[in-house]
Structure formats: structure tokens, C-alpha cells
Amino acid sequence: MQNINVSEMNGLLEIVSKKLGVPKEQLKCELESGKFDSALKNMKPADEAMFNSLVKNPKALEQFMSTPQAQALYRKLTGGK
């Protein structure tokens, strides 16, 4: 799996914060503290359950992020960077 550098992470946070309507710093603080309130509040229950299961299992998250679909989504969200 490709490691994401700080610049890429900040760009991804910026995109996600706009999509969720949550200030970037608030989202970053929540994610760093293990809270996902802003990220989860607008998800469908099935999506929320899948997200929670991935977050609780780093190996599963790593496998998910290495899939072609996740890589394509990352490229789409970051404008192909």
C-alpha cells in the first residue's frame, strides 16, 4: 500500500471536510482522537457499520485501501495526485 504523506493527507482532509460540511480542523481533531461523529452522521447504517468494522481492524483497513477501487477513489478525490 502506498503511504500517504502529510500534504496528501491534508488535501484529503480538505476534500472530506467540504463534502461533510465540517471544518477541516474539527474533522482532523475528531479523527486523531478516534471519534468519527462528523464522518458518520450522514452515512447509511450499513455504510456506518462497514466503516466501524474497518476502523477497528487495521489489517482489514490496509487490505481495503490497497484495492483498486479504493485507490481509484483516492485518485478521484485528490484530483489524480
Image (tube, helix red, strand yellow):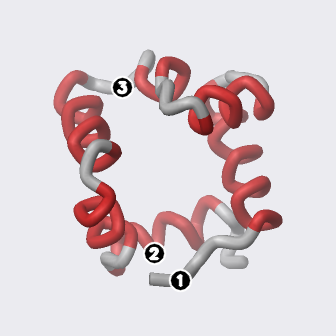
Mark 1 or 3, nearer chain start: 1
Residue 78: image quadrant is bottom right
Q: Amino acid at mark 2?
A: Gln
- What residue is drawn where x is 35% and y is 69%? 62
| Residue at mark 1 | 2
Image vertical order of residue 73 relative to residue 48, above or below: below
| Residue at mark 2 | 71
| Position in image of residue 23 (x %, y %) | 77, 25
Q: Could you tell me how far apart the alpha carbons at marks 1 and 3 are, in whole angstroms?
A: 26 Å
- Horizontal side of 54 relative to 46 (left or right) equals right
Q: Amino acid at mark 3?
A: Met
Q: Could you tell me how far apart the alpha carbons at marks 3 and 2 are, in whole angstroms?
A: 21 Å
For the N terminus, the image quarter is bottom left
For the C terminus, the image quarter is bottom right
Of labels 2 and 1, the one closer to you: 1
Q: Secondary structure at mark 2?
A: helix
- What residue is drawn where x is 17% and y is 31%? 46
> Residue 70 — which label?
none
Q: Secondary structure at mark 1?
A: loop
Identify which residue, 80 or 59, lies in the foreground. 59
Please report contact status of discs 3 and 2: CB closer than 8 Å, yes or no: no
| Position in image of residue 5 (x %, y %) | 72, 72
